[in-house]
Image: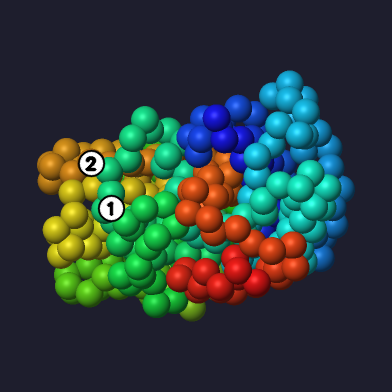
Amino acid sequence: MVLVLGIESSCDETAVALVANGQHCIAERIASQADDFAAWGGVVPELAARGHVAALPSLIEDVLAEAALPREAIDAIAVSAYPGLIGSLLCGVTAAKALAGALGKPLLAVNHIQAHLAAIHLSQQSITYPLIGLVASGGHSHYYLCQAPGQMELLGGTIDDAAGEAFDKAAACLELPYPGGPNVDKRAANGDASAIKLPRPFIKEKDIKLSFAGLKTAFLYAVRGPQGKQELNLDEHGINDACASFQTAVVDCLVAKLLKAAQENDVKNIAVGGGVACNSGLRQRLQVEAENNNLNLYLPEPIHCGDNGAMIATLGYYQLQRGETASLSFEPLPSGRIADNSIRKR
Ligand code: KG4
Ligand code: ZN
């Protein structure tokens, strides 16, 4: 059994997990600062970094205590290395380097976006590759042709906002608290999706391309008048209907391009990861479309859709198998391309 400790601190979640063989999560902790940032309407990078520093040591101890294992039982330490908020990334990376150095165990620098898709391994006995993977989160909405965990080629994606960002902006427009995605999701379950007519940009085009900026503006004008500046004048039903209309438009776009990418690449397996993969409307639609189109669908469990340490440990496990370890002197990157593996070798 190979035990990898995964550390995630790229944004406002501090998360630690111990995963066996890249699949079985033995113990994990996810501490979110989302409630602290509700008052600010978004993440304040400097505060997020301080939150990670305060949370990390006890989360690591809690995970080891729950697993009833000493530190020496850990075979390798994986950490979210890019992309993310640089101050936040540095907290997890520093903790991971300290542990790897002190224990004399390998260090694994993990790409956070790739890890979101690797999270499907935590919920399934076996995954068949190649697959088309969609990562839909607060900062990404892109499609990849994946040959193995962490080995993926970009096919296309959004040309402006990410899906999660669009959900958060739609929620703000309806005066729902941050982070908006889960609130829109809850409200949409009781709403009428045909109440507001909204565009589905690029849906008929063959390119693997998304755009949420125009959809977001159309939504703003629909609920806040032609200049988008009117007072919100919707009752509870009206808000639910607006949420259902917006969610359905986003889901239509995300699913249409996922099916198109699978068809064009002649791939029978599809997967979605990232915070938006929690969305119940998206999950339901994917189940239906996968069945109708004879595709195998892989979705992470809801707890492993948003930022978590288990997905980092899982991808770390596969990197360890391939010998893709990082040196103790590697530096995290705020950006970083999906194919940028050079960081592991520095
Ligand atoms: O993957 P994630 O936790 O962090 C990033 O790497 O960005 O994704 C966070 C995003 C937020 O925009 C949040 O509103 C969205 O995922 N999200 C959802 C849902 N849960 C989280 N969007 C729609 N429906 C949900 N249930
Ligand atoms: Zn994420």
Residue 20 or residue 281, whichever sits in front? 20
Task: Provide the residue designation for mark 2.
Answer: 296
Q: Quadrant of residue 214?
A: bottom left
Q: Earlier in the sequence, mark 2 or mark 1?
A: 1
Estimate the x, y position of residue 256 in percent, counting from the top left: 23, 59
Q: Secondary structure at mark 2?
A: strand
Residue 291 or residue 101, whichever sits in front? 101
Say whether marks 2 and 1 touch (CB < 8 Å).
yes
Estimate the x, y position of residue 290 in percent, counting from the top left: 20, 43
Which quadrant of the rendered structure holds the N terminus? Answer: top right
- Picture layout, residue 256 above or below residue 270: below
Q: CA distance from mark 2 to mark 1?
A: 9 Å
Q: For this view, does 194 lie left or right of residue 142?
A: left
Q: Amino acid at mark 1?
A: Leu
Q: Is mark 1 within 8 Å of ligand 1?
A: no
Q: Amino acid at mark 2?
A: Asn
Which label number is shown at residue 131? 1
Instruction: Say if residue 212 shows up in the picture.
Output: yes
